[in-house]
Every structure is written in C-alpha cells, then in structure tokens.
C-alpha cells in the first residue's frame, strides 16, 4: 500500500486530490467539453468499475480505453500513464485507492471483476 500511496500522491493527486476528493463539479463538463477529474473516494464512481477497466483507463488513458470498448469520440481529460508508471505501479495505485473504501464497497467492486484462473 505504501508504494501505491506514494505513486498516487506523485502522479494522481494533482488532478484527483490528495484525499481522493476529485475536482469540483466533476460531473459537469467544462467549456472544453472535458469532465473534471472525478473523486476516487466513495462519492465518485471509480468503485463502480471492474479492476481491468480501471487498469486500462490508467495505463492507456480515457479516450483510448473507451474507444477500444466501442465508445467513440469521448473527450477525456485522463491521460495514459504507460511509460510513466509500470503495470505493477498502476496495480499498486489501484490497490491503494481500493484500500480507502469501506469493506462493503470493496466487496461490491470486487464482485464486478471477471473470474480468472
């Protein structure tokens, strides 16, 4: 968790907030059509998504990840961190974020993940 927290502070907190609170009015696009950075605490929607989507969104960025899933022309402010964070680093950040949620929310998010061998 310590590595994930450190990486979060270094790479994510400038947009998503030191306390995972996100930017104000995160559900309303700005004049440029881009949504502000959402919170990663329980008030946001991060926990509504499966871990692979969160990983891909972090690694490849919002627009590229959603385009790969059939959502075209989404103007995302989320950059990709491929080349900045290692895959393990991304998983560490996601584990840190997950660790801040209440246990029931962690369980709901975990139930959205595909079973794997």
Image: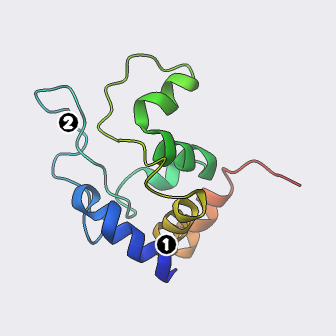
* Residue where numbered disc 1 is placed: 96
Question: Who's the residue at 45% across and 52% down the image?
Answer: 46
**Mark count:** 2
Residue 50 on image: x %, y % = 60, 49
Residue density around tag 2, few if under 14, some if 14–19, many if 20 or more, within 10 Å: few
Q: Nearer the viewer, residue 101 or 12?
A: 12
98 sits to left or right of 15: right
CB under 8 Å between discs 2 and 1:
no
Q: Quadrant of the C terminus?
A: bottom right
Give the residue displayed 32% in from the left and 68% down from the top: 10
- Quadrant in which residue 70 is drawn: top right
| Image location (x, y in percent) of residue 23 | 20, 53
Give residue 7's quadrant in the image: bottom left
Residue 6 x, y percent position in the rendering: 39, 76
Q: Residue furthest bottom?
A: 2
Q: Which residue is mark 2?
A: 28
Q: Is residue 74 above or below residue 85?
A: above
- Left-right relation of 52 to 43: right
In the rendered view, how is the structure colored? rainbow
Task: Identify the residue shown where x is 46% and y is 67%.
Answer: 97
Q: Is residue 106 above or below residue 31?
A: below
Instruction: Answer with left or right where residue 12 lies relative to residue 17.
Output: right
Whether residue 49 is visible here, answered yes or no, is: no
Say whether residue 35 is visible. Answer: yes
Answer above or below: position of 73 versus 77.
Answer: above
State the CA–CA distance, disc 2 to disc 1.
Answer: 27 Å
Say few, some or many: other residues with alpha carbon within 10 Å of mark 1 (under 14 / 14 to 19 / 20 or more).
Answer: some
> Is residue 50 or residue 88 the one in the foreground?
88
Q: Earlier in the sequence, mark 2 or mark 1?
A: 2
Please name which of the two marks, 2 or 1, marks the residue nearer to the observer.
1
Which residue is located at x 60 percent, y 63 percent? 88
Q: Secondary structure at mark 1?
A: helix
């Amino acid at each position: 968790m310590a590595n994930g927290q450190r990486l979060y502070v270094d790479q994510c907190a400038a947009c998503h907030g030191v306390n995972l609170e996100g930017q104000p009015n995160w559900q309303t696009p700005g004049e440029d059509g881009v949504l502000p950075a959402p919170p990663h605490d329980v008030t946001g929607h991060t926990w509504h998504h499966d871990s692979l989507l969160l990983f891909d969104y972090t690694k490849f960025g919002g627009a590229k990840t959603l385009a790969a899933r059939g959502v075209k022309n989404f103007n995302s402010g989320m950059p990709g961190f491929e080349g900045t964070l290692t895959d393990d680093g991304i998983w560490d950040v996601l584990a840190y974020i997950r660790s801040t949620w209440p246990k029931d929310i962690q369980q709901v998010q975990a139930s959205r993940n595909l079973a794997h061998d």
